[in-house]
């Protein structure tokens, strides 16, 4: 029982770690992602549009299989988890080997290794010390540090560069896992919502994407908001002055604009939209006595009254942002300030007479003729609101760390080459003393071939000054097979 | 056109150089007259015109080199490319200065930068990697780009708030570089396949499959009664007409749909004949297929001409709104690019069909091409990664979410996965040669779909690009 369980686990592990599984999983991810871009997706598409696009049976099928919200279904998440497991398994499976390679570099090459190494050369030398000394100077010339490896049966030289490159691919895989982890944390613990504020108000209630409400442990106060436009009327900039109020104390203040949010305790407030509430803030009027006389300027807010003369006062009774008249009544059609109307009540104390003064004069309801004052509108200020997108993404730091790590990892993978050289003094089959030089690079091998040739030439040059005449005659590289890969 | 003539007496080096030189001089003279009239020498339009003139000269010379293999053309061709690049740089700088932001905000500005990148890459490929024929491919693309720019709105448009971010510029620059590197790897992979003795008819099949795909994509806009739907254009505001936020108003050009359907049939014919030749193992069908392809090029040119004429004049009815609306070429950049791209691909095939031996002589050997393709992808992949990362960071600052699975994002991720697959196969499985080249071609196909297809066919947030 235990044995079969163990073998099942081992089998699963092996399957997960194989390249084939990885490729199949990636193809599956690609297929479902494509489906997710071709089939209309639920939260972003209007339900009406969905119904127009698909037949009821089709829609039912798509909804049942989750194809209308591919990227948030359980099986897509399960697929992503499988991909992660596959990356982990593949990395764990191959890591020990790479680590051994990294931690215990192969420093003294044996005969079998020397025979098959593609990049190698042999130079005739006088004695061991002369050969190794020349090689050491050549390495120094190439800014490489070499070390002498002394083994009971051999004596050689080893030099290398950028060993970390062998680990680079694991850095990339780890960074990918970190990004996935961040994404999963956000999917589980992150949230997004919307908040609307008008200047002077504070709020802590957030309307969540799924329709529920969420209360923040602190509140956000809006101290002002506005829009700037280009001369052609397209919006140039939206801004909101926000303040964080926690425990009744003002913690911080910031003017946010699109692309520059406010962050407090991991909750981010984005400038998402801006508009008019359709409520009146201030109405400036010129009041002219009907019998003649000098005009006076007054400013009114809704339900506010102003004394015009000792006998008369005026009150702003009603503001309709977009009015329409039907059956002798005035109604509001929308909250957009496109066709505004105001009703003023002009009361005189003496005669106890109240008159409905409409701006503009709406026939049938307005009693403008009997008003002791005429009013001319001068300026209208309506209320504005700022729409804030609120989000909490605790996993995003893992994502950004992962991105940076991946950039580093990819740089190492593609542009940093692990280069190794070995130099061994040997006797060739004819009994002559030679210097065996070998080298290898883990990538970009054609460029390495050139570097290797340069090294051999440099060693040759270093050999010459102190060499004997006999050696000089044959001091030519014997290409041991600089075979192209 | 002049094929027969070229085959009989190959033009000598000097003839073509003199001819190209004379036409450049003539065009510059015309331009000079215009300049004298307008009194503003270094305006963007003039610089762009100069770039066009030089690129056209370079393109002709590169093409002459591709066809005749006369080495002396190359020197003059690169000289013309240099001159064009300088004028183009001037136009980019002028634009940047005038707009106050790097030129990536509209389709016009992106094309401006794209053409610049293309010319620069051509010179790099030529000088550094000695891939001389590359100009034969890139210069015509650059010319098409500059011509397209003349049709698009060119005035500096203000940036909407979401686009006012440094990260956007980083994102778009990286995208340009990554896509250019992908395009280069595609061109190199194609050259490898030529050098790897892939049969000419296989290229025929690939070309026709591409063209059929192009016309299938255009026909998604086919409307009842044989019309073709295009976006309405508002000439006063120089912009597309929107029904509501993000929803464009389409007008139907009558009968253009039928024409596109006819051309679809014509471009499918060589493919059908090719399949017949494979099934029946009859070489006779192949020569028929090549003839059918020739006819399809003529019909495609006809479709392009009619498309140009019909979109430029007249007002057309819409299914979604009352009344008649005008349209413009600028409203349908993707259809235009698709039509031009189809013709271009077919012409390249003809070049291969007629001049394969010369091409094989001129191109670097297969092994070198295989290696350079891999190296180009090694450059493209980190750029793609950074492009996606910068885009995610920007989205996080602008919309509060670094990844929202909109089609453009998803397809960028798919592109990334395909190239990641290529690298894994190459590094761990030792994939080389033809399979690797096919993989590189597939990668670029996905890139093209991400760049054009997603915007044209799929809905999404990326309304700006």
Image (cartoon, helix red, strand yellow):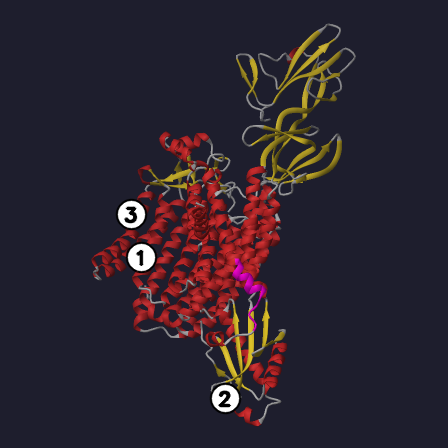
Rounded to the nearest angstrom, the CA distance separating label 2 from label 3 is 81 Å
Residue A325, image x, y percentages: 55, 16
Residue A350, image x, y percentages: 75, 6
Whether residue A414 sits left or right of residue B10 in the image: it is right
Reading the chain from its start, which is encountered first: label 3 or label 1?
Answer: 1
Residue holding disc 1:
B205
Q: Secondary structure at mark 3?
A: helix
Residue that sits furthest to the bottom in the current view: A469
Quadrant for residue A268, please give it: top right
Residue holding disc 3:
B262
Task: Look at the image and give the residue range highlighted in magenta.
Answer: A95-107
Query: Residue, x 69% and y 28% (percent of image)?
Result: A201
- Disc 2 and disc 3 on one polypeptide chain: no
Rounded to the nearest angstrom, the CA distance separating label 3 from label 1 is 19 Å
Q: Is residue B39 visible?
A: no
**Mark carried by residue A431:** 2
């Amino acid at each position: 029982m235990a044995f079969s369980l163990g073998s099942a686990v081992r089998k699963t592990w092996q399957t997960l770690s194989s390249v084939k599984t990885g490729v199949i999983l990636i193809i599956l991810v690609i297929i479902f992602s494509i489906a997710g871009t071709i089939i209309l997706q639920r939260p972003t598409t209007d339900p009406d549009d969905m119904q127009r696009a698909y037949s009821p049976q089709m829609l039912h099928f798509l909804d049942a299989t989750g194809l209308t919200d591919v990227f948030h279904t359980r099986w897509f998440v399960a697929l992503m988890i499988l991909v992660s497991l596959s990356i982990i398994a593949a990395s764990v499976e191959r890591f020990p080997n790479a680590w051994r390679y990294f931690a215990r570099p192969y420093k003294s090459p044996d005969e079998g290794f020397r025979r098959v190494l593609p990049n190698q050369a042999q130079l005739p030398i006088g004695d061991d010390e002369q050969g190794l000394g020349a090689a050491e100077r050549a390495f120094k010339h190439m800014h490489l540090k070499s070390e002498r490896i002394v083994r009971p049966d051999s004596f050689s030289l080893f030099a290398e560069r950028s060993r970390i490159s062998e680990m680079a691919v694991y850095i990339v895989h780890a960074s990918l896992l970190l990004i996935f982890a961040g994404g999963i944390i956000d999917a589980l613990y992150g949230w997004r919502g919307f908040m609307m504020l008008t200047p002077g108000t504070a709020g802590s209630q957030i309307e969540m994407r799924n329709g529920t409400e969420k209360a923040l442990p602190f509140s956000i106060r809006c101290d002002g908001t506005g829009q700037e436009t280009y001369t052609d009327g397209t919006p140039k900039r939206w801004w909101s002055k926000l303040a964080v109020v926690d425990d009744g104390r003002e913690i911080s203040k910031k003017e946010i604009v699109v692309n520059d949010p406010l962050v407090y305790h991991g909750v981010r407030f984005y400038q998402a939209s801006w508009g008019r509430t359709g409520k009146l803030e201030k109405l400036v009027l010129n009041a002219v006595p009907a019998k003649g006389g000098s005009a006076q300027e007054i400013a009114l807010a809704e339900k506010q009254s102003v004394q015009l003369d000792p006998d008369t006062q005026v009150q702003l009774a009603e503001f309709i942002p977009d009015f329409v008249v039907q059956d002798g009544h005035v109604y509001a059609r929308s909250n957009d300030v496109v066709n505004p109307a105001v009703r003023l009540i002009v009361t005189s104390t003496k005669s106890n007479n109240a008159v409905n003064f409409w701006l503009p004069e709406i026939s049938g309801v307005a009693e403008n003729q009997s008003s002791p004052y005429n009013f001319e509108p001068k300026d209208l200020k309506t209320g504005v609101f700022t729409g804030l997108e609120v989000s909490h993404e605790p996993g995003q730091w893992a994502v950004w760390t992962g991105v940076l790590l991946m950039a580093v990892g990819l740089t190492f993978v593609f542009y940093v080459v692990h280069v190794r050289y070995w130099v061994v003094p040997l006797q060739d089959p004819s009994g002559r003393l030679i210097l065996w030089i070998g080298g290898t690079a883990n990538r970009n091998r054609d460029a390495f071939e050139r570097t290797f040739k340069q090294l051999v030439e440099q060693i040759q040059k270093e050999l010459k000054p102190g060499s004997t005449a006999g050696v000089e005659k044959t001091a030519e590289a014997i290409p041991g097979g600089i075979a192209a890969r | 056109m002049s094929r027969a003539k070229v085959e009989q007496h190959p033009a000598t080096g000097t003839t073509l150089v003199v001819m190209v030189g004379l036409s450049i001089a003539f065009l510059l003279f015309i331009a000079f007259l215009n300049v004298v009239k307008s009194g503003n020498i270094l305006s963007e339009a003039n610089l762009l015109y100069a770039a066009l003139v030089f690129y056209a000269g370079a393109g002709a010379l590169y093409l002459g080199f591709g066809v005749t293999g006369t080495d002396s053309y190359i020197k003059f061709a690169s000289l013309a490319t240099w001159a064009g690049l300088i004028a183009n740089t001037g136009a980019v700088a002028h634009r940047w200065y005038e707009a106050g932001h790097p030129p990536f905000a509209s389709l016009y500005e992106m094309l401006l930068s794209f053409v610049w990148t293309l010319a620069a890459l051509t010179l790099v490929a030529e000088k550094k990697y000695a891939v001389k024929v590359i100009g034969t491919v890139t210069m015509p693309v650059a010319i098409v780009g500059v011509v397209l720019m003349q049709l698009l709105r060119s005035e500096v448009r203000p940036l909407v708030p979401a686009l006012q971010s440094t990260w956007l510029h980083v994102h778009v620059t990286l995208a340009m570089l990554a896509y250019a590197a992908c395009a280069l790897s595609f061109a190199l992979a194609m050259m490898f396949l030529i050098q790897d003795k892939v049969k000419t008819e296989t290229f025929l099949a690939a070309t026709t499959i591409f063209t059929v795909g192009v016309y299938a994509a255009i026909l998604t806009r086919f409307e009842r009664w044989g019309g073709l739907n295009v976006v309405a254009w508002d000439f006063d505001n120089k912009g597309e007409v929107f029904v509501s936020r993000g929803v464009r108003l389409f007008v139907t050009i009558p009968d253009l749909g039928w024409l596109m359907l006819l051309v679809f049939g014509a471009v499918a014919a060589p493919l059908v004949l090719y399949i017949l030749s494979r099934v029946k193992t009859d070489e006779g069908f192949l020569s028929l297929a090549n003839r059918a392809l020739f006819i399809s090029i003529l019909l495609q040119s006809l479709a392009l001409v009619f498309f140009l004429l019909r979109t430029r004049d007249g007002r057309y009815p819409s299914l979604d709104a009352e009344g008649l609306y005008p349209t413009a070429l600028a409203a349908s950049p993707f259809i235009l690019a698709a039509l031009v791209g189809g013709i271009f691909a077919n012409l390249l095939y003809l070049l291969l069909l007629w001049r394969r031996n010369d091409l094989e002589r001129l191109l670097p050997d297969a092994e070198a091409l295989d290696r350079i393709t891999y190296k180009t992808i090694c450059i493209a992949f980190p750029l793609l990664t950074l492009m996606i990362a910068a885009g995610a960071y920007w989205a996080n600052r602008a919309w509060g979410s670094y990844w929202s699975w909109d089609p453009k994002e998803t397809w960028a991720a798919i592109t990334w996965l395909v190239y990641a697959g290529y690298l894994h196969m190459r590094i761990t499985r030792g994939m080389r040669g033809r399979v690797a080249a096919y993989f590189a071609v597939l990668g670029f196909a996905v890139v093209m779909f991400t760049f054009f297809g997603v915007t044209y066919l799929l809905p999404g947030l990326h309304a700006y690009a």
